[in-house]
Image: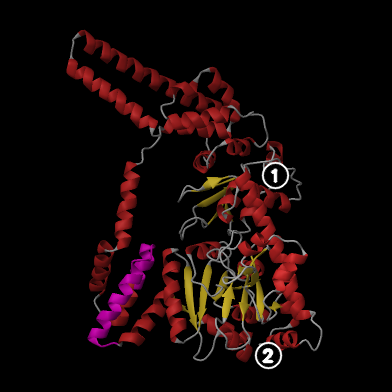
Amino acid sequence: MYIPEEKVSEILNTSDIVDVISESVILKKSGRNFFGLCPFHSEKTPSFSVNAGKQIFHCFGCSAGGNVLSYIMKYHGITFPEAAKMLARKYNITIETKDIDPAKRKLFHLKESLFRLNKTVMGIYFDELKNSAPGNKAGDKARKYLKQRGISDDIIQQFNLGFSPDKWETIVKVLKEKKIPKNIAVQCGLILGRQQKTGYYDRFRNRIMFPIFDVNMQVAGFGGRVMDDAMPKYMNSPETPVYNKSRILYGLHVAKQFCRQTGFVYIVEGYFDFLSLYQHGIKNTVASLGTALTPDHVRILKGYAARMILVFDSDTAGINAAKRSIKIFLKEGVDTRVLVLPEGNDPDSYIVKYGRDAFNELAKNAKTVMQFLLQVSIDTHGLSVEGRIRILDDMKQQLILIQDSALRSLYIKDLAENLNIDEKAVLEKVREHYLNGPVKRAYLDDSEKEEDTLASDRREEQMISLMLNFPKIIEEIKDRDVLDCFYSEKLKRIAKKIISIDPGKEAFISDVMAKMENSEDQELIASYAMNDFVSENIHKTALSIINRIIRVRKKQQNTLTAKIISAGKGCDSDLMELLKQKQAEIQQLHGRL
């Protein structure tokens, strides 16, 4: 699907980047810009900036940047046409499309087909649960089961819960009736091919069905639970082009507004845990779909809540699940608490038995991550001399994951006091593990990469910033052939694209961004456009930089030429060779920029 350039401009001119990004990042205004925690890398101090006037974003931490379309593509991991269509739908813009690359068009249409099919099947499962005739034993059993679990009709309606009959071809027959291609249903994970003979059969049978929505309210997949002791107890859709379990959290599509209102989010494991909490008024809750939490999950949640509370059972499986999850939260630098429920309870049973107020009171005493890990380690090893040494070995592995040095120092002090061990000894153990561990090696590897990265000429970068923020100077740059004096080939290429855009256009920076061929160039444009020049006479400042760029280039050319002539006259072969090498070094240096 090719989207005409004028339609892209309409989308960029109509959309509000602050409004769009605020849906996934908590933004606070500071001066001219809005700041928040970057959704693309781990950080505790906001370095992610959004400029409403220029309609761009830029992260000073990881250098991600671009316009509103760039953000939607990067955040949701989707293509340009998909991002454009998402924004067009949000702002009621009609898109007339043209043909594009067949492979991209095929993937785009496949995703649309999968979403439509999921929505259709959701309706079928819902009808099987709610509208099957009284006396239908299977339907009656499903309704009775949900009633015994305490799930109200309102919750069934709101989350479109359903029932998959204990039949092999319920969905297969629907596909035939609606003439939906089998390959679409197979890719959606709803049906499976028979191994012994031809044909297909339903994946989900005799299960309570939970449609899984993405944050855009589209049905991405399904989860199914048996109503007896059959195994597997839970079954989810496989990974598909529209269902990525490492990025989707059950219930986030409705919980996100409540997470923002309260400033924190409860994270539970199961569908019924989520539904029971939500039904009892604790709506700032999401569920992990029974899979391990990922860095993407945490980064997505950071856009809605500053604090995260992990809610687990007190049995061994619950404790181990908590321990596995904690590493990710430590690495992401999130304020995380752990709530371990009293023995014999899960979130569903506890809220049903004791109610909302009791749950909220329990949550007030949720432990910090380090308090939780320390208590688990004490319970495991005891406080004998040997036990305390083992506890220290356990804790040092967690402490090196904390990126905030001040916070790490406080935890080390607290650990030393709890174990009655000298603080210096604890610090030494942690430092020793850090220096010998993978965290340090990764840090050193990154440092070496940074040393290999060459910086562009600062004046050329300033020139591009001025071109973006004060397009009126572009005519002066053209008249004086300033770009021919650039050393950086990369910056020269970007600058030439900038001067090809009409500087009188209202959405000049957005149009420049759209002209860039890759995300790296878009990120550079965003970073340069973010620069604010404090000057009473911008034109005078621009002329000063222009003159400086031209003067430096001519001076170096004249000096080098004079030296070469002088060396030639004196037949100084060594100096000639040195100058040739110097020229080659200069070309190599600026060729890499």
Q: Which of 526 and 213 is in front in this view?
A: 213
What residue would you read off at disc 1? 11
Report the disc number at residue 472: none
Tell me which residue sits at (72%, 53%) in the image: 90
Q: Is residue 93 left or right of residue 101?
A: right
Percent coordinates x, y for residue 140 in the rendering: 75, 87
Q: Is residue 326 left or right of residue 589?
A: right
Q: Single out the residue that lies furthest toward the top.
A: 569
Verify whether residue 175 appears in magenta. Answer: no
Percent coordinates x, y for residue 536 in the rendering: 55, 31
Q: What stretch is highlighted in magenta?
A: 383-411
Tell me which residue sits at (70%, 85%) in the image: 142
- Considering only vertical position in the picture, is 382 above or below 491? below
Report the disc number at residue 148: 2
Q: Is mark 1 on a helix, strand or loop?
A: helix
Q: In the rendered image, is residue 519 in sight?
A: yes
